Image (cartoon, rainbow, N blue to C red):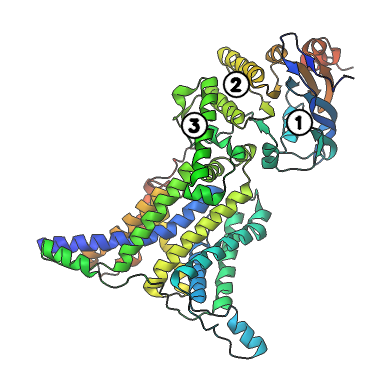
Amino acid sequence: MTDQLLFAAEVTLNGLMAGVLYALVALGFVLIFKASGIFNYAQGVLALFAALTLVGFQNGQVPFAHLINAVFGGHLQSFGWQLPGAVAIVLTALVMVALAVLIERLVLRHLVNQAPIILFMATIGLAYFLEGFGDILWGADIKKLDVGLPQGISETVETLTDSLFGYGFFIDNLDIVATLVAALLVISLTLFSQFTKYGRALRAVADDHQAALSVGISLRFIWVMVWSIAGIVALVAGIMWGTKSGVQFSLSLIALKALPVLMLGGFTSIPGAIVGGLIIGMGEKLFEFFVGPMIGGATENWFAYVLALLFLVFRPQGLFGERIIERV
Amino acid sequence: MKDASEATTTPDGRKIGAVMMEMRNITLRFGGVVAIRDISFDIREGEIRAIIGPNGAGKSSMLNVISGFYHPQEGEVWFRGRKRGPMKPYQVARLGIARTFQNIALFDGMSVLDNIMTGRLTLMRSGLAAQALWWGRAEREENANRESVEKIIDFLEIQPIRKTPVGRLPYGLKKRVELARALAAEPRLLLLDEPMAGMNVEEKEDMSRFILDVNDEFGTTIALIEHDMGVVMDLSDRVVVMDYGRKIGDGTPDDVRNNQEVIDAYLGVAHD
């Protein structure tokens, strides 16, 4: 019995850490939704694009290599250098900021005061564009991403738990790193938004556009800032997921896993995104562990969505979302 | 009105300076509807200037022209001796024009203190990087700004609610917080859109006192819109009266009170 309990504890721990990765993706959604009321369908593709760019920089790939080769002939592949992970990450972060500026210039600026559904459609367009653009830019093959994060089963945790409980926990080093990074990210984002003037401006825009304008806040600047932060959060998510399972198209589908997280946590709450992610991550692992065997397994594919549906019925604003009050 | 450039002193000893803002032949249309028709007037340094008129007279539109939310099709806006081109509201705010709204536009989710702090955004200079890393300058600046905000909080007597989320406050206090936020920007010109709307007598008296105190203590020029005639006449140095988008009167409260066209507009008159 204790064995099973320990095993359940291990499953829980693993679930929590998977949940952190979901939360990272959900965080990007929440940031943009809070500041501009836009549901950014392209968030997952942003993560894919960031990861592709990161790999490209790191391996010194020539941008548009396939296109150039196809048009002019030749066999351009790479510049033949390898950048250190940290340098490539900084460069990619700059690219994400530049992308945010472009998105504001070319898309958002022209859609000011449009209905949310129009902006939503625009982000769908953006998602498809970025997906294709990423492929043309860096190639569509599956890439390995390694920025030097530790991977594999953590021996420290295994020997420690073994000496404590007589049972070694299997925890992936990468999951531990992801948890630490996510915690750091959330703490710094919270501090930024609570204690700096730009954070205050950000919350002001999220609360009331008109009032924000009247105290001298430029909406465009805030939007660029928010999309930059969302882009960098996407980069972090892209690094974690990309290291785990390679950089490929399916990386953009992690956005789908973020949806149930958002329904649980609420679209407007940063802590909600974290807690939602943890609940989903832990819930789906535990459900698979306890109930899975009785109903034939593979519950992880649908558990999160069913949980989200239940939330939609009983608490549509999520755990931490703003109460929906209909005034008549 | 010929001596517009000369400084004068009011009977109660306040100094009224040169012309600060001048509206020249402003016409504002929404499609085929003319909201403001060829209106000119000025606002002088240190005065309390009221714009009054019945509902739908175009008062709020006029205020929105001054604050840059609307751009008039015709006419010129001059501010401190310079013609102002089409500007974004946030640029106008950075010129030193702060405002409040008729139907209160506060940040409901934020505390009273944070709301007022947003008023100082235009006065804070440190860059994004310094702010993000909370480096020397950002911290000093934040503290200095906190001090001046605390003074305004004292001044408007809202100490007990500094940490309360604004969404939970009653209407009268919200109006006061909105005034505090506008004051925090240390504006040259303060625009108040119906500061007494929806208030009871006691709240109106408080608000009148604050408006007079602000003008007296900080020397802030104030332009306000009201349709409550009584309040306006007691508060203001000069009054513009609008009706159906036209200017029908302009002068001291006494001049305006005796203007036949104004009386007709307010009391109604038989058309024949």
Residue beneath the point at 79% across and 11% down: B257
Residue B83: x %, y % from top left: 82, 38
Identify the mark at residue B62; answer none if there is no mark. Answer: 1
Residue beneath the point at 50% across and 24% down: B170
Residue B13: x %, y % from top left: 72, 11
In this rendered view, identify the residue nearer to me: B45 or A7: B45
Identify the mark at residue B198; answer none if there is no mark. Answer: 2
Residue A294 sits in which quadrant?
Answer: bottom left
Give the chain letter at badge 2. B
Mark-to-mark CA distance, 1 and 3: 30 Å
A65 versus B23 height, above or below: below
Residue A112: x %, y % from top left: 65, 50
Q: Is residue A264 left or right of residue A222?
A: left
For the C terminus of chain B, give its image quadrant.
Answer: top right
Q: Please state which amino acid type lies under the numbered disc 3.
A: Leu
Q: Where is mark 3, residue-wise?
A: B113
1 and 2 marks in contact (CB < 8 Å): no
Mark positioned earlier in the residue sequence (1 or 2): 1
The crowding category of the residue bearing disc 1, from other C-alpha atoms within 10 Å (few below 14, some 14 to 19, many at least 20), is many
Q: Is residue A60 left or right of residue B163?
A: right
Residue beneath the point at 64% across and 37% down: A214
B14 versus A5 height, above or below: above
In this rendered view, identify the residue nearer to me: A266 or A61: A61
Q: Please state which amino acid type lies under the numbered disc 1.
A: Met
Mark positioned earlier in the residue sequence (2 or 3): 3
Residue A149 sits in which quadrant?
Answer: bottom left
Mark-to-mark CA distance, 2 and 3: 24 Å
